Amino acid sequence: MRLETVAVIGGGAWGTALAQAAAMAGRSVELVLRNPELAQAINTTHENAAALPGVPLLEAIVATTSLSSADIVVLAVPAQATRTLLASLDPALLAGKAVVLSAKGLETGTLARQSEILADMAPDSIGFVLSGPSFAIDVARGRPTAVTLAGEDANQTSELATALAGPSFRPYAADDRIGVEIAGALKNVYALACGAVEGAELGASARSALIARGYAEMARMVAAMGGSAHTLTGLAGLGDLTLTCTSVQSRNYQFGMALGAGRRTADILAGGAKLAEGVATTPVAAALARSLDIDVPLIDAVDAVVTGRADIATIVAGLMSRPLKREH
């Protein structure tokens, strides 16, 4: 594969950060936006003031409103918008190209992973999944960040990881796309739960227990989907779960804090909360677990809180009254 030029579709904080990382790796980068005024402003000021104010962007990044024939295409739109975005593109533009999926979530209605959506909409593309412990501001400012890049072909994945690696952004190649995608989606669900524990002032001990039990629950889901439990010991699993479930920088954690404080999902969204992928993913994950006949009490609990069927106090009481079992 030719891997010299990169097009990042999505001008939010994460898309801008990935464009910066690709430029730091020595690639020529297009940042594809919907807003022509924002594109012009970025090209003039070399800053995305709307998404990452105060972060200077490298001159190798050129903002545009149309996708060209880049060697590598990075999709950096919300998980629920991936299918709509792909429907707007000519599949021929992606044929034979490396397409990197960076959204972490399961699709409402279809229960599909991001790579499954890509296979539906652009079957001739070569899909890769990027996930791991990373905040946009850290990536954009060149702070040390290590992530996982998963693909089906080991050689192609390693070549792409090398092409995107820079002095501070290190993608490690892997072959378990299923495990990486499921871990990336579910960690947002557990981050909502950990944030709710914080918002309800239930203590650090409860949060730690929740992370541990969430990890075990995630492992059951990954195994049932055909992924590898070994994936969860790495960056895309334990690394991302730990970061998202312990940091107030996490949008999902922040949203969970509001839920734990007694606010309703609709009110939080109406108040202008930033996108938290876990809000949409939680009911999808619960439905997926039911279809696989997997016991996921934590996902079910978060689903009840997000959908307003129960408050955090009721949920905690229910979880604490579950029968004691041996820990494996």
Image (spheres, rainbow, N blue to C red):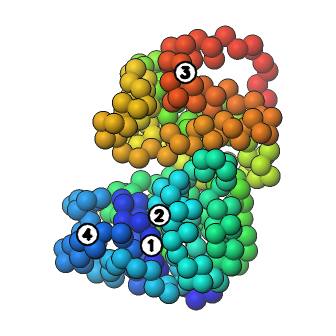
Residue 18 lies in what quarter of the image? bottom left
Quarter of the picture holding the N terminus = bottom right
Residue 217, position as x, y percentages in the image = 70, 35
Mark-to-mark CA distance, 4 and 3 = 41 Å
Which three-letter amino acid code belongs to the residue tagged 2? Ala
Say which residue label 4 marks.
38
**Sequence-earlier tag: 2 or 3:** 2
**Sequence-earlier tag: 4 or 3:** 4
Height in image: 279 above or below 119? above
Mark-to-mark CA distance, 2 and 3 = 32 Å
**Sequence-earlier tag: 4 or 1:** 1
Residue 282, position as x, y percentages in the image = 58, 38
- Residue 50 in sight in this render: yes
Residue 292, position as x, y percentages in the image = 79, 40
**Other-residue count near label 1 (Cα within 10 Å), few / some / many at <14 / 14–19 / ≥20:** many
Say which residue label 1 marks.
8
Question: What numbered label is drawn on residue 76?
Answer: 2
Q: Residue at x 30, y 58 (%)?
A: 51
Q: Nearer the viewer, residue 16 or 211?
A: 16
Residue 260 lies in what quarter of the image? top left
Numbered disc 2: secondary structure = loop
Numbered disc 1: secondary structure = strand
Say which residue label 3 marks.
309
